[in-house]
Image: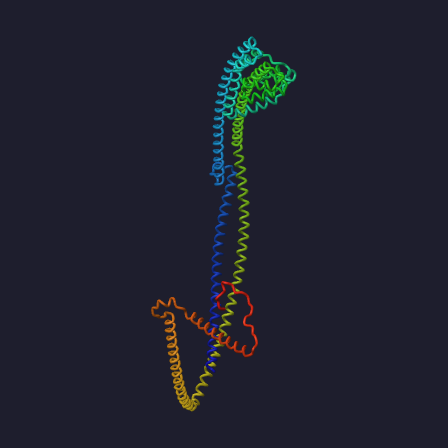
C-alpha cells in the first residue's frame, strides 16, 4: 500500500518536472525573440543615425550653395550633379534637334532634285507634244485644202478623206495616252493632272452659252494653233502678280497661261459641243470611246446612230473634237508644269521660313538659357528644402515612435521578469513541500516495515507449508491435464490419418473414372448402346404386359358376354413423329 502511494507521488513529481521544462523552453523562445527585436531596433537606430547624418550633410551643402548663389559666385564653382545632368540632357536634346534638321534638309534637297527631274521630263514631253502638233498641223492643213477641192459625199471618197485627214488626229490620241502613262509614273504629276482635269470640267465659261449653236468651220484654228505653238515655248508660270487660279473669268485672260487662253477662246468660239446638241455630242463621244479614239472606225457607227447628221457633218465634228482634244492636252500639260513650279517655290519658301523660325527659336533659347538656369536652380533648391523638411518631420515621428516602443518594451520586460521570479519562487516552495512530505512518508513506511518484521515469521512458515501443498496439488493436476491432452492429440492424429486415407482412395477412384481402360472392340461401333438395350427390354416387357392384359380382357369379355371398346379416337400422328415413343 505504501509502495503504491510512493510510486504515485514519484509519478506526479515527474509530470510536474516535464511541465516546468516545457514552460522554461517557452520562456527561452520568448527571450530569443526579444533579443532579435533588440538587434533589429539597434540596426534601425543606426540606419536612422546615418540618414540624419546624410540629411545634415545635404543641409550644409544646400546652405553653402545658397550662400554662393547669393554672393554671385556660382558661375566659378562646379555645378551640382543635377545641374550637370540637366546640361547633359539639354545637350543631347540639341544634338537630336540638329540631326533632325539635317535629315529634313537632306529630304528637302532630295525633293528638290525629284522636282527638277520632273520639270526636265515635263519639258521633254512638251517638246515632243510641240513637234507632234507641228506635224499634225501641217498634215491637217494639207488635208483641209485637199478635202475642200476633191472630197464628195460618196462613201468611198469620204472614207479616204477621213483616213488621210485624221491620221494626225489618231497620233494625237495616242500621244495623250502615252503622256498620261508618263505622268502616272511620275507620282505627284498624275495627281496634279487629275485636279486640273476636274477643274477644267467644273470651270464655268460664259462665252460658251452665247455661241453654243455656232458651227465649226474647218481651218479656222490653224492660225490659233500656230500662235499657241509659238507661245508654248514661253514661260510656264503666269505673269507676275497673278495670284488667282486659271479658272477665273475672261476679263483676266492677260494673267492666264497661253495654252489656257487658247483653249478658252476655242471653246468660246465653237461651244462646248461644237454646235451640236448635247445629246448628239454625248452619243458621238460614247461611240468614239467605244472605238478607242479611232475616228475612222467610229465614223460609220456615228452616222448610223445620228440620222439627222450627214457624213460630212460628222467628219467636220470629228475634226473639231480632235482640235479640242489637242488644245485640252496642251492646257493640261501647261497647268501641270505651272503647278509643279508653284509647289516647288512654295516648298522652298516654307523651308526657308522653317529654317528661319528654327534659328530664331535657337537664338531665343540661348538668350533665355541663363535666366532659365537660375529659375531651375532656385526651383531645385526649394524642392530640396521641402524634401529635407518632410524627411526631418518623418525622422522625428519615427524617432518618437521608436522611443515609445522602447519604453513599452522595457515595461513589458520588467513585468515579465517579475512574473518569472514569482513563478520560480512559487515553484521552489512547492518543491520543498513535496520533498518534506515525501521524506515523512518514507520514514513512516520504514517504521511500519520494521514493526511488522517480527510478525511475519510465523505467518511466513504457515504460508510456506500451505504453498508446498498447493504446489503438489498443482503438479498432480498438471500431470492429469497433460495425459488428457496427449490422448486428445492421438485421437486427432488418427482421425486426420483416416481422413487423408479416405481422400486418397477417393482421388484414386476419380482418376480411374477419368481414364477408363477398355479392350479394343471394333464391333462395338455397330452394336447398340446400353440405353438402346434398356429401351428394347422395356418395350418387350411392355408388349408382354399388353399381351397379357389383352388375353385377360378377352377372357373376361368372353365370360361376361359384354362388349368393350378396344379403340378410342385420337388425333393423327404426324409423319415426323411416327415411330417415336413418348
**Left or right: where does residue 477 sit relative to residue 561?**
left
Q: Who is closer to the viewer here, 41 or 160?
A: 160
**Left or right: where does residue 248 sit relative to residue 417?**
right
Task: Work out whether 209 lies above or below 436.
Answer: above
Q: Is residue 239 visible?
A: no
Q: Position of residue 440 (x, y in %)?
A: 47, 81
Q: Position of residue 359 (x, y in %)?
A: 52, 28
Taking the view exactly as shown, the residue that stands out farthest to the left is: 520
Q: How is the image coloured?
A: rainbow
Residue at 54% x, 79% y is 559
Task: Work out whether 371 lies above or below 353.
Answer: below
Q: Position of residue 24 (x, y in %)?
A: 47, 67
Q: Position of residue 358 (x, y in %)?
A: 52, 29
Residue at 54% x, 70% y is 567
Q: Is residue 361 visible?
A: yes
Taking the view exactly as shown, the residue that stands out farthest to the right is: 210
Q: Who is closer to the viewer here, 77 or 244?
A: 244
How many discs appear? 0
Q: Who is closer to the viewer here, 452 or 428?
A: 452
In which quarter of the view is residue 486 placed? bottom left
Q: Who is closer to the viewer here, 41 or 2?
A: 2
Task: Work out whether 509 lies above or below 201.
Answer: below
**Left or right: where does residue 26 sit relative to residue 514?**
right
Amino acid at each position: 500500500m505504501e509502495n503504491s502511494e510512493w510510486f504515485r507521488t514519484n509519478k506526479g513529481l515527474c509530470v510536474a518536472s516535464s511541465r516546468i521544462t516545457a514552460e522554461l523552453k517557452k520562456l527561452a523562445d520568448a527571450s530569443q525573440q526579444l533579443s532579435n527585436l533588440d538587434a533589429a531596433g539597434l540596426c534601425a537606430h543606426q540606419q536612422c543615425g546615418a540618414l540624419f547624418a546624410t540629411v545634415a550633410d545635404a543641409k550644409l551643402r544646400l546652405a553653402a550653395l545658397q550662400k554662393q548663389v547669393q554672393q554671385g559666385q556660382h558661375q566659378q564653382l562646379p555645378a551640382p550633379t543635377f545641374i550637370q545632368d540637366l546640361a547633359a540632357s539639354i545637350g543631347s536634346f540639341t544634338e537630336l534637334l540638329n540631326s533632325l534638321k539635317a535629315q529634313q534638309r537632306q529630304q528637302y534637297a532630295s525633293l528638290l532634285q525629284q522636282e527638277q527631274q520632273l520639270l526636265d521630263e515635263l519639258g521633254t514631253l512638251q517638246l515632243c507634244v510641240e513637234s507632234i502638233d507641228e506635224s499634225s498641223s501641217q498634215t491637217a492643213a494639207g488635208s483641209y485644202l485637199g478635202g475642200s477641192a476633191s472630197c464628195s459625199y460618196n462613201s468611198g471618197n469620204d472614207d479616204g478623206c477621213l483616213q488621210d485627214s485624221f491620221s494626225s488626229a489618231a497620233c494625237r490620241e495616242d500621244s495623250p495616252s502615252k503622256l498620261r502613262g508618263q505622268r502616272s509614273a511620275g507620282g505627284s504629276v498624275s495627281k496634279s493632272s487629275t485636279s486640273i482635269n476636274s477643274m477644267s470640267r467644273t470651270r464655268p465659261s460664259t462665252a460658251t452659252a452665247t455661241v453654243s449653236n455656232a458651227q465649226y468651220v474647218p481651218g479656222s484654228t490653224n492660225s490659233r494653233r500656230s500662235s499657241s505653238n509659238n507661245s508654248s515655248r514661253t514661260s510656264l508660270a503666269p505673269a507676275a502678280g497673278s495670284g488667282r487660279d486659271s479658272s477665273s473669268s475672261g476679263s483676266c485672260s492677260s494673267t492666264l497661261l497661253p495654252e489656257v487662253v487658247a483653249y478658252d477662246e476655242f471653246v468660246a468660239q465653237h461651244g462646248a459641243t461644237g454646235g451640236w446638241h448635247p445629246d448628239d455630242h454625248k452619243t458621238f463621244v460614247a461611240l468614239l470611246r467605244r472605238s478607242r479614239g479611232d475616228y475612222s472606225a467610229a465614223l460609220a457607227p456615228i452616222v448610223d446612230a445620228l440620222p439627222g447628221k450627214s457624213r460630212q457633218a460628222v467628219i467636220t465634228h470629228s475634226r473639231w473634237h480632235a482640235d479640242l482634244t489637242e488644245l485640252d492636252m496642251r492646257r493640261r500639260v501647261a497647268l501641270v508644269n505651272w503647278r509643279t513650279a508653284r509647289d516647288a517655290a512654295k516648298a522652298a519658301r516654307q523651308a526657308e521660313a522653317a529654317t528661319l523660325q528654327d534659328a530664331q527659336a535657337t537664338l531665343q533659347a540661348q538668350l533665355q538659357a541663363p535666366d532659365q538656369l537660375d529659375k531651375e536652380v532656385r526651383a531645385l533648391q526649394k524642392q530640396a528644402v521641402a524634401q529635407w523638411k518632410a524627411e526631418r518631420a518623418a525622422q522625428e515621428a519615427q524617432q518618437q515612435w521608436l522611443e515609445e516602443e522602447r519604453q513599452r518594451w522595457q515595461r513589458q520586460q520588467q513585468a515579465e521578469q517579475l512574473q518569472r521570479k514569482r513563478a520560480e519562487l512559487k515553484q521552489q516552495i512547492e518543491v520543498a513541500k513535496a520533498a518534506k512530505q515525501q521524506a515523512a512518508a518514507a520514514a513512516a513506511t520504514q517504521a511500519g516495515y520494521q514493526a511488522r518484521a517480527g510478525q511475519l515469521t510465523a505467518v511466513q512458515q504457515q504460508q510456506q507449508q500451505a504453498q508446498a501443498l498447493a504446489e503438489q496439488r498443482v503438479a498432480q493436476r498438471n500431470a492429469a491435464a497433460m495425459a488428457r491432452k496427449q490422448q486428445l492429440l492421438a485421437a486427432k492424429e488418427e482421425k486426420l490419418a483416416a481422413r487423408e486415407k479416405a481422400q486418397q482412395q477417393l482421388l484414386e477412384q476419380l482418376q480411374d473414372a477419368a481414364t477408363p481402360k477398355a479392350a479394343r472392340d471394333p464391333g462395338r461401333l455397330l452394336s447398340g448402346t446400353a440405353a438402346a438395350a434398356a429401351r428394347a427390354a422395356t418395350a418387350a416387357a411392355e408388349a408382354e404386359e399388353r399381351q397379357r392384359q389383352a388375353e385377360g380382357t378377352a377372357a373376361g369379355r368372353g365370360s361376361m358376354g359384354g362388349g368393350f371398346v378396344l379403340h378410342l379416337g385420337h388425333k393423327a400422328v404426324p409423319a415426323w413423329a411416327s415411330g417415336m415413343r413418348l
